[in-house]
Image: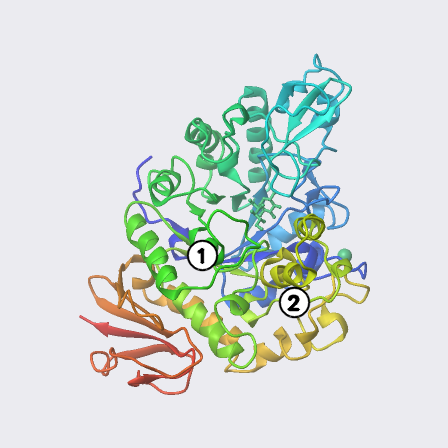
Amino acid sequence: MEDKKEKWWKNAVVYQIYPKSFQDSNGDGIGDIRGIIRRLDYLADLGIDAVWISPMYCSPQNDNGYDISDYQDIDPMFGTLEDMDELIAEAGKRKIRIIMDLVLNHTSNEHRWFQEAKKSRENPYHDYYVWRDGEEGVYPNDMKAAFGGPAWEWVPEVKQYYFHQFAPEQPDLNWENPKVRREIYDMILWWMDRGVGGFRLDVIDQIAKEPDLGITNNGPKLHEFLRELSRETFQKGDLITVGEAWGATPEIAEKYSCPDGSEFSMVFQFEHIGLDQQEGKEKWDLAPLSLVKLKKCLAKWQNALHKKGWNSLFWDNHDLPRIVSRWGDDSTYRAESAKMLAAVLHGMQGTPYIYQGEELGMTNVKFKDITDYRDLETVNMYHERLQAGYPLEDVMHSIYAKSRDNARTPMQWSREENAGFTTGIPWIAVNPNYTEINAASETEDPDSVYQFYKKLVHLRKEYPVFADGDFSLLMPEDEQIFAYTRTDAECRMLVCANFTGEPVRCPLSEEWKDAQMLIHNYPGERLDEELKPYEAAILLKME
Ligand code: TEU
Ligand code: CA
């Protein structure tokens, strides 16, 4: 396939919805499809082109839907297939595409395939999963699961272990089996027929695992599987596809996002996300932030994929803490720093993703007690570490910084009870700061974080340099300022940001004094010699 016309998704901005926490419509405390439909006008006003929704398929919800028991039906908690069709149609009317989340590395242990597979070694579904012989209590090897404990689970009926990279309730699918691959392709084609506009592929770099070699990510057959997957499904439509790839390097990402369309449109890579973690340790083991490292990391990805692939741009998702609490200041300069981070991200080349509530500057949460946390990863870690002798204070400190529940508290719609998310009891508590941070007040306030995001989304549509321009990092060793230019045949654009809560002298103001101010998080049309706390500006010069 030739890349003749520019792909629509190169000018798109995507919004991510975590459906359990977005909008409840029936008072059961859980977000649902009818709730999403109710909020489509809000999303249309923000100007986004597509919505990626975390899984809503039938699921026992051990991992909030990332454990699927039926790929071709909607969990009653979220609604029905008819609701889904209506969502696709209503979104379509507003020129918004719906991106579904495909979890193809594993299913739920309640999936019919697994229920059959564990009955006997002769069962036709047995080989849909990854089994190894062994003896009860003697694991095939010492591989560990992402959510704690060994990666192997014993099934007495077949006297074998099955392999699971995540929870024991999430058995890994066997991609070596062509029947498994065919079932998956048919299921994807079925969703494409229903009008789905794209797919996000969960932990896709882990499907070609080789447990005997201890390999999880980037197995030897990964790209062979992906090219077949893409050929059999995505290439039959005009979709946006994005793979989640924790193990991607820029070289690997070039393959994934090759302009010939042989794999995906783009991948999520996580190098910039791991920067505040001690090397070789877990995400809970915090390391100090370094702006220099962040800049070099993002610049490396910008330059490596320019004209060779395509980047996705994100700070947040449903697994990550809130960016304003991580790289910004979530108290004194909350709004300023949230806008600054938005400008830095949206000025880069790639497709930006906005995670629900990020556009309001929503923050991390600090629940007092572990019983308020819902995420299995957090809860498992809490018990493991306390048992291993870590002080409670340290464990809670890690949770406040990194728990996935930071991103999963309900969307803050208004000052009403439960932030307007539900009239019932929310499945996870609302962040108490909803009285100050909420959509109702921000959509009215011309200076809000929301309005700043909305403007950034529109600027990307108006100025092609956002999508095309080449990237050049300025002052790479500066520890306070993040500045870069984007240049195309017509113009040069400067993105300049103070990453600190202190005023900082900026050597760029003289050169850019006559430039046009596209967006600024403080009043004023000029870049002053001194940047205010978390000040950020995007300026444009014609050439
Ligand atoms: O996450 C991939 C993944 O590797 C996570 O375990 C990640 O390391 C962790 O969340 C960081 O704290 C995807 C989904 O996004 C996540 O929600 C699922 O739980 C996971 O896959 C299993 O499907
Ligand atoms: Ca509901």
Q: Residues within 10 Å of mark 2 (few under 14, many from 20)?
A: many
Which SS class for mark 1? helix
Give the residue type at disc 2: Val
- Give the residue at x 59% y 39%: 103
| Position of residue 436 in the picture relative to residue 340 (left or right) | right
Q: Is residue 125 visible?
A: no
Image position of 150 with respect to 5: above or below: above
In the image: residue 3, left or right of residue 75: left
Q: Residue 397 at x, y = what percent?
A: 62, 63
- Residue 87: where, in percent of width, then height? 64, 53
The mark found on residue 434 in the picture is none
Quarter the N terminus occupies = top left
Residue 174, percent from left and from top: 58, 25
Q: Is mark 1 within 8 Å of ligand 1?
A: no
From where the camera sits, is residue 538 visible? yes
Q: CA distance from mark 2 to mark 1?
A: 21 Å
Q: Position of residue 149 (x, y in %)?
A: 66, 38
Residue under the image location 71 percent in, 66 percent down: 367
Name which residue lies at 47% across and 58% down: 314
Indicate how the structure is coloured in the image.
Answer: rainbow
Query: Ligand 2 is located in which of the four quadrants?
Result: bottom right
State the SS at label 2. loop
Residue that carries the numbered disc 2 in the rendered image: 365
Judging by the rendered image, the residue that carries numbered circle 1 is 275
Number of numbered discs overlaid on the protein picture: 2
Left or right relative to 517: residue 53: right
Badge 1 amino acid: Leu
Above or below, comparing residue 162 to residue 19 in the picture:
above
In this rendered view, identify the residue nearer to me: 208 or 96.
Answer: 208
Quadrant for the C terminus in the image: bottom left
Q: Is mark 2 within 8 Å of ligand 1?
A: no
